[in-house]
Image: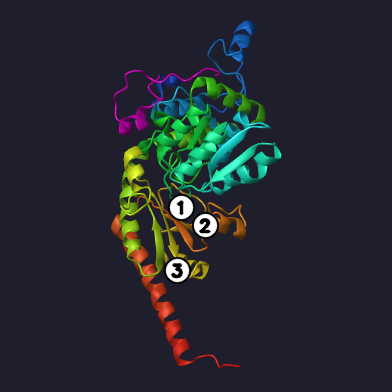
Amino acid sequence: MNKKVEVEQGNTASIETRVVWGGEQVQHPYNATQTPIVVSAAYGYQDIDAWYDVALGKQPGYIYSRMSNPTVATLEAKLCDLEQAESAVAFSSGMAAISAVLHTFLATGKRVVSTRDSYGGTNKIFEEFLPRMGVQVCLCDTLDTEAIEREIARGCDLLYLETPTNPTLKVLDIQRLAAAAKRVGALVVADNTFATPLNQNPLALGVDVVVHSATKFLSGHGDVLGGVVCGDESLMAQVRHYREINGASLDPFSAFLIIRGIKTLALRVRQQQASAQALAEYLCGEPLVESVNYPGLPQHPGHAVARAQMRGFGAIVSFVLKGGMPTVTRLLPRLQYAHRAGNLGAVETIYGPARTTSHVENTLEERLALGISEGLVRISVGIEDTADLLADLAQACAAVREELAREAEAVVRHPEPQV
């Protein structure tokens, strides 16, 4: 359906209600209470002229599911409601959504400004793929807002923001940077995956295009891939055209799973970020830990900005272990209530080092250049009981400390002979 999804005017319901009802206050076929999964590849018409009008977007309807699908359209409408956007376009994965936005609005001779701290796949687009197209890429120190503003002023066609960043949890001042971009006529894109629409709405802060990896918190159950892009219809029409021709469309069953997952987003994130705060505070006092990254900590460099632009601090915590990867390999296998996997946003807690999760596409040298230590571990906090998660992490850390102490004592008792 090549037309914008209208946001309901005067909708004063809370976001906790809108995650359930957004985009779904319609009459479904057969009076179903849930969005149906429409798996037809094509849609037929007796009236050839009507078919043509639908194909041109002059009339509502569907002609081919690579272009539009009723189940996918419901997901797009729900994201419009949650991000208060005029239009949305769904994709087969988060990276498909990010790639489509960057390739839609950038071309030879254009200049994009972003930060060094971004998801590894996004960083690869900046470092590897866009330069092949003749796009000039400028990646700035994430915490140096003035340096980012200077680069924007030097010339910028697109400003790309990710906040909080993956996996370092740095926070960017969206409103300030968006204003700088607007002064030079640049398009502003923001990845809102970590914050979710529950905690942050970048469009209200001056951003033009919001992207989500729906694989993560939106679906919330680790069983589906998807991505969504939101913004004004004038922009989304261009993104939609790119998707139609390049083909990274979301399938209807995945759309259904994401719709179902979003309905519990508020309940899940409320518990997840409460536990995240508790885990972050525990880690600050853990002797094995060198540093902790979580915007909810008062000592976090972006705490004040996060308080101003976010309604909650999210469910992701990262920390750096002393001793690097050898300590990581000791700690993670001892956790009882955790997957060791390359995903986030699920109901189960997930632990993983950057080298096998967010930045698996990057070499060791590239990760170190990005400021990502081999000892950095990302926790995607699940919905389990907070006390159980704390006890689990504490027992794992205690076991590693005891093992290291025994090994150190053995070295003292039986030092290696000097040659």
Q: For mark 1, what is the residue?
A: 168
Helix, strand or loop at label 1? It is loop
Is residue 418 toward the left or the right of residue 266 in the image? right
**Residue 13 is a magenta residue:** yes
Q: Callout 2: 10 Å neighbours few (<14), some, many (20+)? A: many
- Label 1, label 2: how many angstroms apart (C-alpha)? 8 Å
**Residue 270 is a magenta residue:** no
Q: Which residues are magenta?
A: 1-26
- Against 306, residue 202 (above or below) is above
Q: For mark 2, what is the residue?
A: 372
What amino acid is found at the position of numbered circle 3 in the picture? Lys
What amino acid is found at the position of numbered circle 2 in the picture? Ile
Q: Quadrant of the N terminus?
A: top right
Figure coloring:
rainbow
- Against 265, residue 334 (above or below) is below
Residue 362 image-quadrant placement: bottom right
- Label 1, label 3: how many angstroms apart (C-alpha)? 16 Å
Residue 303 image label: none
Residue 322 image label: 3
Q: Main secondary structure of the magenta part?
A: loop
Q: Callout 1: 10 Å neighbours few (<14), some, many (20+)? A: many
- Label 3, label 2: how many angstroms apart (C-alpha)? 14 Å
Q: Which of the two labelled residues, at mark 3 and mark 2, occupies the earlier sequence position?
A: 3
- For the residues bearing labels 1 and 2, Cβ distance under 8 angstroms: yes
Q: Quadrant of the C terminus?
A: bottom right
Q: Position of residue 218 (x, y in %)?
A: 43, 39
- Seen at 46% across and 49% down, the residue is 344
- The front one of 389 and 95 is 95
- Against 83, residue 309 (above or below) is below
Q: Position of residue 14 (x, y in %)?
A: 29, 30
What amino acid is found at the position of numbered circle 1 in the picture? Thr
